[in-house]
Image (cartoon, coloured by chain):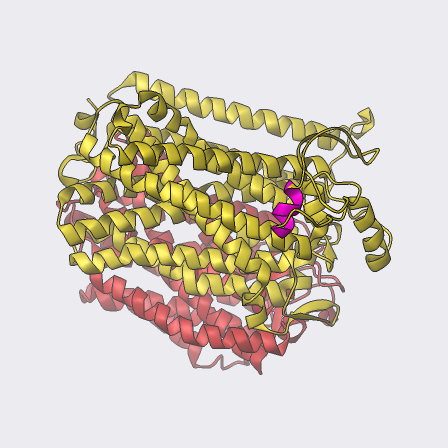
Amino acid sequence: MLETVWFSLIAVLFVGFFFLEGFDFGVGMLTPFLGKNDLERRAIINSIGPVWDGNEVWLITAGGAMFAAFPNWYATLFSGFYMALFLMLLALIVRGVSFEFRSKLESARWRTTWDWLLCIGSFLPALLWGVAVGNLMKGVPIDGSMNYVGSFWDLISIYSVTAGVCMVLLFLLHGALFLNLKMTGDLRQRARAFALKIGPWTSILLLFFVALSYYETELFAAQGVNPGLIPILAGAALLSVHFFLKAGRDGWAFAMTGLTIALSTITVFMYMYPNAMISSLNPEWTMTIYDAASNPYTLKVMTIVAVTMVPIVLAYQIWTYWVFRKRISVKDHLEY
Amino acid sequence: MKDPARFFNYYKLMTCEIYHTSLVTKVIIMRATSQERGWTVLDALELARWQFAITTVYHFLFVPLSIGLAYLIAYMQTLYVVKNDETYKTMAQFWGKMFLVNFAVGVVTGILQEFQFGMNWADYSRFVGAVFGGPLAVEALVSFFLESTFLGVWIFGWDKLNKKVHLASIWLVAIAATLSALWILTANSFMQEPVGYVINNGRAEMSSFFALLGNPQLWVEFPHTLWASLVTGSMFVVGISAYKLLRKQQTEVFRRSFNIAIVVALASSLLVAFSGHSQSQHLMEAQPMKMAASEGLWETTGESAPWTLFAVIDPEKQENRFEVKIPYLLSILAYNQTKGSVPGMLELQAEYEALYGPGNYIPPVRTTFWSFRIMVGAGLLMILLSLIGVIGYARKKVENWRGYLKLMIPAIILPYVASTAGWVMTEVGRQPWIVFGLQKTSDAVSPNVTSGMVLTSMIGFTVIYGILAACFVYLVVRFAKQGPAPAGRASRHESEVLA
């Protein structure tokens, strides 16, 4: 019971992470492309400046929660996806400091360097998270003592890379829609045009990924022919983005990619349940959440903490979005 | 590219850093790959130890400054709000700029800290996750969210929020940073002195959350760390203010900064010493082996124990070749009285073998011994320096003491030396245990991670960390040279101010 509660809570944390860092990553990837000069790039970065760090904590919390609630899952996943996590950490490190470092010197070369590091540092985690999700769905070589016995290259397949590219496209779209909501003038128009252009491709690739899942995973066997409301709504939300954009409903368009991200994440977790790590070597070696979980006392304590804290966190984070709700113009005072 | 010389310097610095890192890396690779030459071969375990040491020491260079500076900035900004004096706003913004650059490096290196347990120490994570993971998750939920969210509010909220709400945001950052220290030290204290757990299903499981929080080790370790953070923050402000006062630039801003910080430096460096004393007394009960190693004490002392100021230690022969001793002092340090015997390593080794089975339970003695002395030496020096500063401040003469002010610039490094040495002593002195009495470090490493993987990630992280350190130092030096922007507004006119 508590295992299921915690599996759901981890899902909630990942929904939060993908929803919030999703547009941060998207905005980061778009910065050097949509911003034609230093001022425009600064304006783009300022759209996520006050919130990106708080958004990233959703990942750190998800990691900490996995450690506390499912130590075996945490240990197997993190030691197993070693090189992928190494690359992701490098990316997150350079991306994180780029926000603070980039405007601190006047030099054009300094700033361009950090803008590109921001771009790459946002692209890599998006891609790698997609690859990780693809692998988690497909199953990875886990042996009888819960250890990943493959190499980094075993994580790379058409299926997992498709998942990675899907994630990148989805975050690009999410980020562009966020900018369309936050910017003014030319920058807003460029973001909107980009979203309109990339939207259909995102839908097509996601559909392709779902089709691949038929061959590569048990997704359809698990869900039956009728996949249920959640994945269908995820797809419908993505398709509706185009129409909301055309109708000039920017807020709705952004909410729709958010919904797609949230519902897709939930779909993946529902598909995985009650497995944490699917073994591609032997179904008996698949690690369930019951194999992975902490003792009931730990889970109980952590549940009390999480159920108290998550609403409080949500409340003050929503408050910050309200404080910084104004659209950003290149005419504003942008430096800090 | 307005000033080519400046950028030449900057690239020179970067190149030096990369070159230096690559040399270190080369040595490590050579050691790791030259088995045929009969060199020591580093296996995954030893590399994982090194990686943990490098990344943790590095991370902790930034953490104490974040905590200490947050409080100083919050105090300055409080003065601004209460007295409505723009100078205090300029101060808060100037130190805030340094704080942000420092904080950024602390945050990004912190993510790695959390991930590293699972990556390199999977068997440790499996064994203690049900206890150790708890405080980590709480740290993220209670502290990291608060800290990072309200830091964003503080950075971007100067013009958007009313003064009091904006002031509250920096106080929340300071409090959240402190809470974060509390939770991570709860986790660390469990490694030093496991409490609140039962061994079940072949692993440690949490049995009492409040026992974890009430760990006596935590309540000597946390205050020590907190005061040390305030020392780091205040010595930093003192050093840079001294630099500006020497040049008679923006004297009002830096006089006030100096005065606030020097008082904090004296108070907190004294508190570090007191809390350190209570920590070493607790060490006597909880980890006597670490105590004996930090004293280079092979044989159990007589009725009253002398304190060894200096010793040439021979770990092979398990004896000291040369010692300078101060009578009674160790008894006083350990028990607050002139009498009291302190057990030596050989006696404890025999005791532990009976308790835990055969094996070597003596940590690397030289490292533990010297790191302790370096920490104490740096600490005492800081008490002395800040005492002189407070006297100078009280007599309103400190600005004329040019020699003293010059000395306070390199003194910025003292808290870093002390913190690093303190952590080296704490962690190395606990060896061979990763969790005292429960799991050895050699049993904790990920079984499926190869030395090549650890080496690759170590090279990657070290290179990036080297570059970040170079950027950080460069930016701080530059900010210090250029001083605060006029009228509280940041950046735009940087180059003119610098002139």
In the rendered image, residue B110, in percent from the top left (x then y), is placed at: 48, 49
Q: How many marks are shown on the rendered structure? A: 0
Is residue A198 visible in the rendered image? The answer is: no
In the rendered image, residue A34, in percent from the top left (x then y), is placed at: 27, 45
* Depicted B26 relative to depicted B488: above or below: above
- Residue A228 lies left or right of residue B318; in this view the side is left
In the rendered image, residue B239, in percent from the top left (x then y), is placed at: 35, 31
Which of the chains is yellow?
A: B
Q: Is residue B330 magenta?
A: yes
Q: Is residue B82 magenta?
A: no
The stretch of residues the image draws in magenta is B329-336
- Residue B174 lies left or right of residue B48; in this view the side is left
Is residue B219 visible in the rendered image? The answer is: yes
* Depicted B19 relative to depicted B432: above or below: above
Q: Nearer the viewer, residue B424 or B341?
A: B341
Which of the chains is red?
A: A
Q: Nearer the viewer, residue B398 or A178?
A: B398
* Depicted B287 relative to depicted A110: above or below: below
In which quarter of the view is residue B247 placed? top left
Which quadrant, please, contains the N terminus of chain B? Answer: top left
Q: Nearer the viewer, residue B234 or B62?
A: B234
Identify the residue at horizontal 50%, vertical 69% (top origin). A10
Majority secondary structure in the magenta region: helix
In which quarter of the view is residue B393 placed? top left
Q: Residue furthest top?
A: B5
- Residue B25 lies left or right of residue A319; in this view the side is right
In which quarter of the view is residue A120 placed? top left
Which quadrant, please, contains the C terminus of chain B? Answer: top left
Q: Nearer the viewer, residue A291 or B10?
A: B10
In the rendered image, residue A64, in percent from the top left (x then y), is placed at: 52, 62
